[in-house]
């Protein structure tokens, strides 16, 4: 089962807001609804939102009544802007939409040919994502030893991609290779992608795990109870600074201080060579209610009028990153020089 797929003239996506309590699919027939689903995090994870937006653009083609190619292209351009605005940090979103628009503009044929072409391209992009993940997983699994305990942040599995996953895909492949691995799953406040989604996936794959609160990682690394740290990324700058789910920076600091390698696993579509360093990456600020609306033992945790901050991502400086695993191999420092070689 894919997280994002096209069936019966509709885009279907797993509703990630309600897992693991319920497994439900939602169908989409309009690009604006797809953009809303990305913002609301029905679908989330950098490659998954890229694929969702690609299918959203295909839907926009079928929604448009344009008879001429030029009129259709104009409708696609405005849909592309709506989709790209859905979330700012993961570059895969803009990358996917821009790739489809570029190819659509250069293809030949009638308006209907272009409509079908955009759908085919979206399907191609989704299929490629799975293939790329499998390549990354092979490269990354070589970094894992039998008996390793690995700390993993956020959700980077099949749910964050079209299928298989980035960092969790690496762990899954290492497990399939017969390596005995234990995963300490950061719960990943505030939206709990680790506790809800990564734990759910690890159960499906039969990989042993325990959930830890985010502030426990330093303790396990210092005690030598975790050997490696794996996470994904939403955008990697040209110098190897990594924007990923909030909390990644603190985890990478703790890993560095204790001599544990920290790997970021990314398709090359997540590498943004146009940005010289990580401070240029736009960081999404989400509603404070994601931080405040929690309960402990059935009671609200925070005072009624409490305020909160909620940056959804942070930037880990390149000096804390041991290696960046891509479908074209593992990249080591100097990242500025070596990232260019893997982005084709
Ligand atoms: O806010 P989310 O859940 O979309 O954030 C997802 C992450 O930060 C992932 O770690 C990232 O997309 C890389 S893994 C595919």
Image (spheres, rainbow, N blue to C red):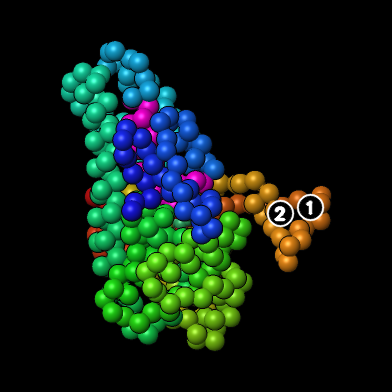
Relative vertical location of residue 337 with respect to residue 4 in this rendering, above or below: below
Q: Nearer the viewer, residue 297 or 307?
A: 297
**Residue at x-position 34% and y-position 69%:** 172
Is residue 116 among what the camera can see? yes
Q: For this view, does 47 lie left or right of residue 139?
A: right
**Magenta span has 57?**
yes
Relative vertical location of residue 343 with respect to residue 222 in this rendering, above or below: above
Q: Nearer the viewer, residue 141 or 281?
A: 141
Q: Which mark is residue 130?
A: none
**Residue at x-position 43% and y-position 46%:** 25
Is residue 140 among what the camera can see? no
Residue under numbered circle 1: 306
Secondary element at image label 1? loop
Around disc 1, counting alpha carbons within 10 Å, would you say few (fewer than 14), some (14 to 19), or many (20 or more)? few
CA separation, marks 2 and 1? Answer: 8 Å
> Residue 273: image x %, image y %?
36, 48
> Residue 287: image x %, image y %?
65, 46
> Residue 120: image x %, image y %?
24, 36
**Residue at x-position 57% and y-position 73%:** 212
Which residue, as the protein is rendered here, is positioned at the far top?
67
Q: Is mark 1 within 8 Å of ligand 1?
A: no
Residue under numbered circle 2: 292
Secondary element at image label 2? helix
CB-based contact (under 8 Å), mark 2 and mark 1: yes
Residue stretch in magenta: 41-61
Q: Which comes before the other along the chain, label 2 or label 1?
A: 2
Q: For this view, does 156 lie left or right of residue 341?
A: right
């Amino acid at each position: 089962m894919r997280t994002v797929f096209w069936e019966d003239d509709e885009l279907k996506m797993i509703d990630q807001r309600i897992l693991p309590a319920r497994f439900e699919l939602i169908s989409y027939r309009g690009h604006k609804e797809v953009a809303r689903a990305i913002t609301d995090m029905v679908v989330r994870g950098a490659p998954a939102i890229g694929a969702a937006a690609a299918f959203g653009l295909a839907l926009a083609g079928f929604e448009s009544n344009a008879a001429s190619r030029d009129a259709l292209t104009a409708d696609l351009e405005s849909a592309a802007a709506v989709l790209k605005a859905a979330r700012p940090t993961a570059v895969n979103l803009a990358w996917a939409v821009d790739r489809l628009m570029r190819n659509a503009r250069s293809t030949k044929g009638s308006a209907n040919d272009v409509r079908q072409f955009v759908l085919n391209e979206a399907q191609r992009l989704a299929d490629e994502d799975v293939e790329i993940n499998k390549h990354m997983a092979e490269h990354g699994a070589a970094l894992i030893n039998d008996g390793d305990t690995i700390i993993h942040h956020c959700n980077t599995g099949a749910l964050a991609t079209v299928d298989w996953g980035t960092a969790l895909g690496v762990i899954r492949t290492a497990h399939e290779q017969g390596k005995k691995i234990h995963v300490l799953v950061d719960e990943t406040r505030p939206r709990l992608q680790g506790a809800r989604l990564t734990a759910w996936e690890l159960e499906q794959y039969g990989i042993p795990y325990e959930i830890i609160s985010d502030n426990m990682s330093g303790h396990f690394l210092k005690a030598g109870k975790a050997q490696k740290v794996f996470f994904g990324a939403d955008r990697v700058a040209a110098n190897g600074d990594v924007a990923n789910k909030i909390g990644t920076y603190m985890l990478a600091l703790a890993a560095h201080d204790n001599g544990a390698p920290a790997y970021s696993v990314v398709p090359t579509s997540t590498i943004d060579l146009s940005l010289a360093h990580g401070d240029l990456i736009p960081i999404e600020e989400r509603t404070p209610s994601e931080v405040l609306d929690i309960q402990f033992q059935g009671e609200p945790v925070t005072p009624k009028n409490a305020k909160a901050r909620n940056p959804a991502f942070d930037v880990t400086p390149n000096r804390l990153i041991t290696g960046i695993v891509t479908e074209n191999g593992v990249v080591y420092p100097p990242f500025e020089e070596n990232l260019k070689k893997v982005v084709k």
